[in-house]
């Protein structure tokens, strides 16, 4: 048999849980969840996909990186922003500085020859308004991709290009998501 004190404790525990749930529900009721790429408009009036399609991407300098990696990043961003739609009037400019570095991460035990590399792509980007030349957003993004090194020269070149491409695609997705988030929340 339980004591009256035990019943009182269980009621208090239940009340605490119920009160906590009610407060959490009240706080969550003030939150607004909506699809990022849906048809709902941003506080500025346009839908996020239309805002993304209005971005003009400056050519990415390959001064500190491979030309192919710069081209892959540019093409991925162009596709991600426009999604095959008609070219909209460009309202924004995106400038990207890119750096690509490779480092050894694995060494063959007896021959002291690299067995694996990691490719790291670092980017800094600036989104600005074309009409006013005002900076709207700045950010940094990076991605890494590993590849194996073998005794076959063509396989090594192809593996390196593939790692550069994978890193460029990851950076493009990150930049797109961050800029879409900016458009979705700006007022």
Image: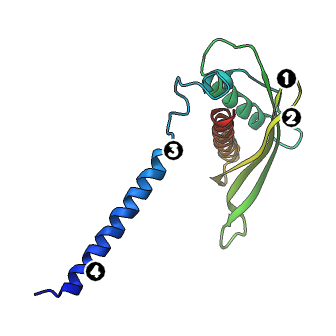
From mark 3 to mark 4, how far is it between C-alphas? 34 Å
Q: Are marks 3 and 4 in contact (CB under 8 Å)?
A: no
What residue sits 44% from the left and 51% below the top? 26
**Along the viewing direction, whichever of 21 and 181 lies nearer the viewer:** 21
Residue at numbered disc 4: 9
* Label 3 CA crowd tier, 10 Å (few <14, some 14–19, many 20+): few
Residue at numbered disc 3: 31
**Along the viewing direction, whichever of 44 and 111 lies nearer the viewer:** 44
| Residue 163: percent from left, percent from top | 66, 45
| Residue 119: percent from left, percent from top | 71, 51
Which one is earlier in the sequence, the residue at label 2 or at label 4? 4
From mark 4 to mark 1, how far is it between C-alphas? 65 Å
What residue sits 48% from the left and 52% below the top? 27
Residue at numbered disc 2: 61
Mark in the foreground, 2 or 4: 4
Which one is earlier in the sequence, the residue at label 3 or at label 2? 3
């Amino acid at each position: 048999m339980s004591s009256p004190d035990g019943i009182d404790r269980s009621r208090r525990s239940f009340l605490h849980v119920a009160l906590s749930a009610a407060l959490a529900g009240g706080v969550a009721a003030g939150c607004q969840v909506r699809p990022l790429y849906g048809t709902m408009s941003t506080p500025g009036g346009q839908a996020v996909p239309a805002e993304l399609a209005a971005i003009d991407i400056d050519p990415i300098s390959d001064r500190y990186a491979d030309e192919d990696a710069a081209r892959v990043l540019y093409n991925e961003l162009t596709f991600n922003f426009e999604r095959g739609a008609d070219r909209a009037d460009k309202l924004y400019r995106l400038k990207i500085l890119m750096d690509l570095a490779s480092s050894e991460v694995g060494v063959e035990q007896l021959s002291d020859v690299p067995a694996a590399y990691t490719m790291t792509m670092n980017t800094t980007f600036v989104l600005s308004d074309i009409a006013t030349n005002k900076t709207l957003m700045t950010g940094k993004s990076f991605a890494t991709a590993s590849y194996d090194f073998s005794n076959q020269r063509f396989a090594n070149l192809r593996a390196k290009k593939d790692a550069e491409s994978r890193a460029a695609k990851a950076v493009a997705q990150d930049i797109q998501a961050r800029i879409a988030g900016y458009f979705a929340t700006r007022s």
